[in-house]
Image (cartoon, rainbow, N blue to C red):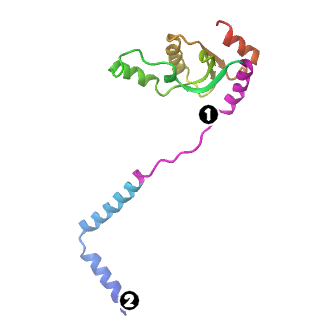
Amino acid sequence: MGASAGQGQLVMMIENLSWSWLAGIGLLGILFVLVLFWTRKPRYRRHSIMTDNEREFYQRLLAACPDCQIWPQVPILALVRPDAKEGSRAFWMAFKRISNTRVDWVVVRDLEVIAIVELDDRSHDARKDAQRDKVLKSCGYRVIRFSSSRRPDPRQIHEAVFHSQ
């Protein structure tokens, strides 16, 4: 009888609580869960610099240019800067256009850029590539593109990189 009396008191207590109190407690619970979700720290995982396809091409690129350094995944901002007053609206518009782009490889000899090499595969967007190439060429860089499906040998790569140097 003591247990049923305790249950009865609990039921009476819940019935006596107004719905606004129950709604408030419910909202606090939801708010607590949302705060936990939004304040969760982002997690990261290690990611490879190159895909398997790019790694295989990189080996051919090394063989084609033995007296050069080959720098992979170089941010375009390491190569060019907007030609506008730094901090101006024009500067930031141009900066945003290129800030998240990278080139596949930069071929360097004696710390001078010889060429920029791109391997076109399914991850490349032709329209964005054309825009990036235009920016790079306007700054005097040679951009050499190879199709991933053609698989040029080191001799062909060497000719393309050093042909019009």
Q: Is residue 6 above or below residue 106?
A: below
The stretch in magenta equals: 37-66
Please state the horizontal and vertical placement of residue 36, each as a whole percent of the image. 40, 56
Mark sitting on residue 3: 2
Q: Is residue 141 above or below residue 2?
A: above
Residue type highlighted by circle 1: Ile
Element type at mark 2: helix
Please state the horizontal and vertical placement of residue 102, each as a whole percent of the image. 54, 25
Q: Nearer the viewer, residue 102 or 146?
A: 102
Element type at mark 1: loop
Mark sitting on residue 49: 1
In the drawing, does residue 107 fall left or right of residue 87?
right
Give yes or no for residue 88 being in the magenta stretch: no
Q: Can you tell which quarter of the image residue 91 is in?
A: top left
Q: For the residues marked 2 and 1, what is the alpha-carbon distance in whole angstroms?
A: 66 Å
Q: Is residue 114 above or below residue 37?
A: above
